[in-house]
Image (cartoon, coloured by chain):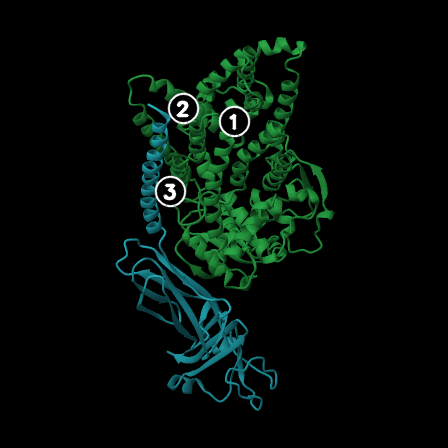
Chain colours: A cyan, B green
Amino acid sequence: MDNEDLSRSIIIACVIGGILVLGINASLRYKIAKDEQFSELYVRTEESIPHAIRINNSHNISYYISNQKDYEAVYVYEIDSYISNSSQTIRVAPGDQVRFDLTLTAKDRQWDINLSLDSLSIHNLDVTRQAFISEQGLVSFVIDNKSLGQYKPFTFNLPHFGGIYHTNLSIEELRKQPFEIDVTNNITDGKMKLTSKQHVSIKSVNGSLIAENNHTQTQFTTLRRSFIVKLFEVNASSSDIIEVHLWYEVTG
Amino acid sequence: MRNNLLVLGAILLMTVLIRVPFTTHEIGYDSFRTHWMAQSISSEGTAKWLVHPASHFGLYPYSYPSFLPYILVILSTVLGITLETAILVFSWFLGFSGVLFMFIFARTISSRIEVAYLSAFVFAASPIFLAFTVWSASTRNLFIVLIPLLLYLILRFYNTRNTIYLGLSLLFFLIEALTHRLFITLILFIIVPFILSMIYWRFRSKPYLQFLEKKLMLIIPAAFILLFLAQFSRIPFYCNLQHNYLDGFLFDAGTHQDYLGCNLNRTVLFINLILDYVSRNGLPFLFAPLCLLSWLILFKKGTYRFWHLWLVTSLIMGTALSMLGTYTTLLFLPVFSFISAQGLYISYTLISRTRMPVMTLLTLFLIASLGFTELMNIHWLMKIEPLSENRKWMNAGTVAAGEYLKTIPEQGILSVDRRIGMQVRAVTDYRVLPYTDFLMELWVFDHIDPTLQSADFELTPSMNTNYFWALQSPVNPKNDWARLVQSNIEGGDSLEIISRYDIGYVLANEKVDYMPYYPRWEFYKDVFNSSNKIYDNSREGIWELSPQT
């Protein structure tokens, strides 16, 4: 054996060993590249993202899907939001990017109930004991919003009613047709809305005079709502769902 | 001559083949940092952390030697390629250069060209050299490659006294100093032994050194053994270093408590150390003792040459720090490669006197050593880390997230995973919190507050191996990050911190369930629940922070 053999050994080892390692690396790379394939879903921030939408105004927003896989992918994008719920299928070639535009239109303020109060009071009135003759002009509460000053009515002071004046109605008349009135008030202030509904009735039942007050107060508020676009691949081996979700608020 | 070129050509071909990466992107945290530095130089036109002459050598606080990032920027600009491609091209170039430099160094000290071939082979195919030169911009790769060249130039200067070699030695030493802080170890373990050996060599024939000369055969192994065994002692310095070999591939030397009490199992420590050196240097390292034995015979006969003395002195000094593992191997890789190759050659000549098929055996052994190197490379890269998937190389999804960020207005990024943060930073050059230990040293020059200048900070000595001085700064991004993530999105100091670092986006990997590990990270929970998620690729998600704050 001479040193020519040694040189030959090195050459053979370098070529065979090098090719062997290259083969292992190539197969590993193939596997890693497969594992690392992905899809992208995104919006561009330089385009306007709808942080606030006015009622009946439309806001256009573009979404981008990028297919970083080595095959044509069939995607489904689903919209999950208060404004709309729908889904679409879209095909994207490998390495390609597609854009789809969505329009957000808010039809209403999309109030959410924050607080609700209900109260009901029923009073059985004894005219001889509880009623008294009122003095003209000392009116503390007016149910029907009419001026009652020219009479000297008899009055009941009742919780939830205040002073009730019976002016031009006799008990007999109430028996035939109860006195009923509905009062509704709406107050809106920025992100809050207050609704008040009151139903008041005075009726004569079996000789008794019954006053009934049903009052409902509801407080509404506007919440930030999410507009979610989900993307997944049809017939994909992995169950990955990617999503972009934006938060918006409807303004008046 | 033709045969010589053929052998060298085959080794060069092998270095290219084994350096074809199996990952889809660059590898290693060091590489991400260098990439970011190059990216920053490219976009800023200067290295903003070089604010003091000592910064060039990484010896000023929060600086880092920047020769390699500059080289990468030049390569990228001249060739019109991306920085990542420049890193790949440069890794191949380093593989090539390593072979050539090792060959000329080995050829200078060995009379046998076969030993030089084997040295080049062993060096090029050593697992540690491969790990640093496969699509990686770790500054350690350039540092390693230049060591055999530096050894060659110093030796040539010694042999010829030609000042050109002295000039070139100084030039390449300067490049080493501008490449990695390890240049200090070059002084300790290469230059000092060279000077000591030169002095001894000059006066060895003097009567007062004759005693020593005759006892070299005993003194050298005694020094080796003594310094080697000292590392297994209870000397506090070594007790500290023993942590490097607490857990090995096969055995554990004890618990952390055992380590704290300096009670680790010495036998296991020894086995772990040997296995580590073989796994980093490659299978031929097993033949190194044979070479050292042959050198001892030369010392006994008194027929040794200057370079024997130099390398042995250097190795003896290095033995005292063999527990450092990676760094010692890096520094001595050319010497280890040479002694491994010579040991292999001695075995080859011994076996060739028998009837055994020596050529087949050698061929198989060399192929096996390449296989072993590949195995180690895969093992080191594919190790699964507890908090993340394979993060040792950039994942294609992470790169895509970085590319997306580059398309939207530049703002600071808050990353849930600091390793992903580093990678995205390399792609974007955007500021990323948290600053990792790597980036901590550079953060100060990256800070948005123009009033914070390096001169404002108090300079204090530091025992941190990354720098010798530490700046005591009024702003600490690591603490700020910790305060931020434990606050609610609009509570505590979060708004102030977000504003200070100009954080606009949050980057998170949704495949990793962070919450069991970090249940107090209220800030991220808030972001996930209430911020606009503007990007998703199933691996990385990006949330827009600004509208909330």
Which amino acid, by three-letter code, is at mark 1? Ile
Residue A213: tell me if it is visible.
Answer: no
Q: CA distance from mark 1 to mark 3?
A: 28 Å
Q: Which residue is mark 1?
A: B109
Same chain for the residues under marks 2 and 1 in the image: yes
Mark 3 burial class by Cα count in 10 Å: few <14, some 14-19, many 20+: many
Q: Nearer the viewer, residue B441 or B549?
A: B441
Which amino acid, by three-letter code, is at mark 2? Leu
Q: Is residue B194 above or below residue B226?
A: below
Counting residues from the start of the chain, the first of labels 2 and 1 encountered is 1
Which amino acid, by three-letter code, is at mark 3? Leu
Q: Nearer the viewer, mark 1 or mark 3?
A: 1
Mark 2 burial class by Cα count in 10 Å: few <14, some 14-19, many 20+: many
Q: Which residue is mark 2?
A: B344
Q: Secondary structure at mark 1?
A: helix
Q: Which residue is mark 3?
A: B17
Residue B319: tell me if it is visible.
Answer: yes
User: Residue B377 bears which disc, if any?
Assistant: none
Q: CA distance from mark 2 to mark 1?
A: 16 Å
Where's the C terminus of chain B, which quadrant?
Answer: bottom right
Q: Secondary structure at mark 3?
A: helix
